[in-house]
Image (spheres, rainbow, N blue to C red):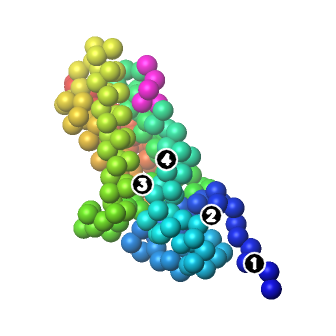
Amino acid sequence: MGRPRTIPRDQAIDRALKVFWEKGYEQTSIADLSAALEGGPSSIYNAFGNKESLFRLAIERYVAQYTGFLAAAELDLDVEPLVLEVLRGAARAYTSPNLPPGCAIMQSGGAPGARHSRAAAITLEVKAAVEQQLERALARAAKTHDTTLAASSRVVAKYLMTTMRGMSQLAIDGASCRELLAVAKVAATACVAR
């Protein structure tokens, strides 16, 4: 009897990401991961250590492959166009027909009230880094283009994170890209003092 066939590591991480994305960390069992990765629990433990380690790798993969829209925050744009580009990118990513709806980071880190779980800590790290990136980008855009933000760059960055979380949930609930783009447009205008 030969050894059981195993899928390549990168493919295993991609498959695990999809399971975590669709079910969330807390609701994903080792049996779910075993089925997706076509191996038994022992093969998962041997390859990845534990569920948490595999989750961390899956979230790192998500960041590397599906958050490219955040690069718009580094463009030399005024505040409103910068925000619009970031949120348009989020709208497209959250409604991609080839992926589960929404944002894996926003929805997979744990059930409500599980903010102290290890999975929540992993996704909170990523969300904090994104928020800091947005805060710096907003401050830079406001200064460079002499634009007054509706609030401090920190508060506006939190507003954008809240908007992206809401857009993620709308996508999960079935909203179209077009609907999310309309939300993005309104949110972008709200970031600048009038």
Q: State the CA–CA distance, disc 1 to disc 2.
A: 17 Å
Q: Few, some or many C-alpha atoms within 10 Å of disc 4 (few <14, some 14-19, many ≥20)?
A: some
- The foreground one among 157 and 172 is 157
- SS at badge 4: helix
**Residue 93 within the segment the image draws in magenta:** no
Q: State the CA–CA distance, disc 4 to disc 2.
A: 16 Å
Q: Which residue is mark 4?
A: 63
User: Which amino acid is tagged 3?
Assistant: Ile
Query: Which mark is in front, 4 or 2?
Result: 2
- SS at badge 3: helix
Q: State the CA–CA distance, disc 3 to disc 1.
A: 35 Å
Q: Which mark is residue 105?
A: 3
User: Which amino acid is tagged 2?
Assistant: Ala
- SS at badge 2: helix
Q: Which residue is mark 1?
A: 3
User: Which amino acid is tagged 1?
Assistant: Arg
In the image: residue 176, left or right of residue 35: left
Query: Which mark is in front, 3 or 1?
Result: 1
User: Which amino acid is tagged 4?
Assistant: Val
